[in-house]
Amino acid sequence: MQCRIDGRVSRTLADESPPLRKLAPHAVAILLPAGAYLVLRYSGWLGAAPLQPWREAAALAVTLGVAAVVLLRYRSGFERQDQAAAAAARTDAALQAEIRQRARAEQDRDRFFDLSMDMLAIAGADGYFKELNPAWERVLGWTLAELLACPYIELVHPDDVAATSREAQRLRLGGSAVDFENRFQTREGTWRWLSWRATSLPERGLIYAVARDVSDRKKVEQMKDDFVSVVSHELRTPLTSIRGSLGLIAGGVVGKLPEKVGALVEIAAKNSERLVRLINEILDVEKIESGKMGFRFIAQELMPLVEHALASNRPYAQQFSIELRVVEALPGVKVRVDTDRIEQVLANLVSNATKFSPRGGTVEVRVTRGAAGSVRFAITDHGKGIPASFQDRVFEKFAQADASSSRQKGGTGLGLSISRAIVERHGGQMGFSSAPGNTTFFFELPDWITFDGLLAEAPGISAEDQGASAI
């Protein structure tokens, strides 16, 4: 700041007196020798008249030398002053530019701070908010002044106070928070769920946080939980009884049925079976997402599992005159798997390939060695292939290439999503390749020797899953 003032003063002097500064050296050069000569002339130093030329020449030389020295010093003083003024001016300009840049940055920050849809906050170690953006007032209804005036813990739901206090203490010690959730009270007395991401500067005693209102998401999750509960308890149990009863009737337990009645019973039995599969798939998705799907891993030969899956699906394939053929095999190769879950994956892939094969075609099954000691299972059909526009959504839940109400192929769009999740829980991976006339779905599993080393790293495998493993 002092540099800026000095520079401004120096620049003012230099700008306000340019004629004086330009004329001064010339005036000195003329007046100083003349004055010195007159002093010497009339002081008697040169002696009485008539004057001796050499004395007068010496006097003029001395006065001219003195004048030259004074002039040079005078000019060098002006030059130093000019240089100092220029340096001060440059420093002042740099400071002014930095001030303007910081002012613009602060304006941009404040603009984003005010316009953000997320709830931005700066909190202190004393438990009070220090700064909030307007989103807080929009979500909770409190004015910003009211929110800043009370400890934020007073607005937290009683059931969330302990967890919030622990999280705040961890932040004060230099930690960070990701997806921490709690409930804040609104002005109307209701509660809003907030999801937090936060970091801190312990040396300054400040916590920087971003909160997002996730109340609507919580409502949807609750609706989903309620729906799953209804599906599990109110639909599956009676539907299972209906399916069993229809199966008994179709099997002739109550006697031989008339042809038309038998056809209707068979249709009802097939649709009941379809509904049961849909319910089971929905429940499987919920178990996978909530981490509640249990696994019991055992060392098992892969080929018997493959043969069992093919045998189970041959009656279905025969309806379309489809041949299921094992083209390549690995007899004796073991994998450590949950048998029921892997059979579920195999059955799903085989039935899908059958469903999308042309009538009278062949579904080819290959079991080979994959990379890094893995075992690769691949199944190929020779149907139309998967449209390019749909390929990036193949494994999404409820995704179907033909989602119209008039589609010819049945299914819920859950099977591939569930299958990939099961394979990943086994430490494997699933993928596909598709072109017109040739579509291959495959998955790779570590063999039973490699599996033990990968078990702890496989996504989603919990300690309970590992504890359930057996040979």
Image (cartoon, rainbow, N blue to C red):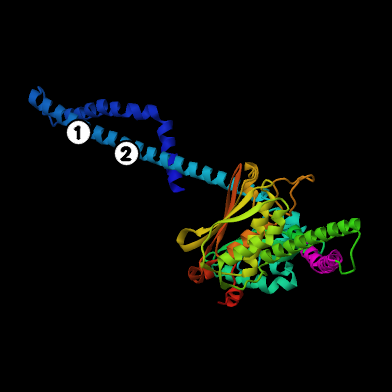
Say whether residue 247 is magenta.
yes
Q: Mark 1 or mark 2, which has the lower sequence index?
A: 1
Mark 1 = which residue? 66
Residue occupying the point 85% across, 63% down = 250
Q: Is residue 413 visible?
A: no
Specify few, some or many for label 2: CA neighbours under 10 Å numbering under 14, 14-19, or 20 or more: few
Considering the numbered disc 1 on the image, is that residue within a helix, a strand or a loop?
helix
Q: x and y percent of residue 182 in the render?
A: 70, 66
Residue type pointed to by label 1? Val
Q: x and y percent of residue 325 in the render?
A: 60, 55
- Label 1, label 2: how many angstroms apart (C-alpha)? 21 Å
Q: Which residues are magenta?
A: 224-251
Residue occupying the point 49% across, 41% down = 97
Mark 2 = which residue? 80
Q: x and y percent of residue 329 in the render?
A: 53, 60
Q: Quadrant of residue 163?
A: bottom right
Of residue 179 and residue 45, the one placed in the foreground of this image is 179
Quadrant location of the C terminus in the rendered image: bottom right
Q: x and y percent of residue 204 in the render?
A: 54, 64
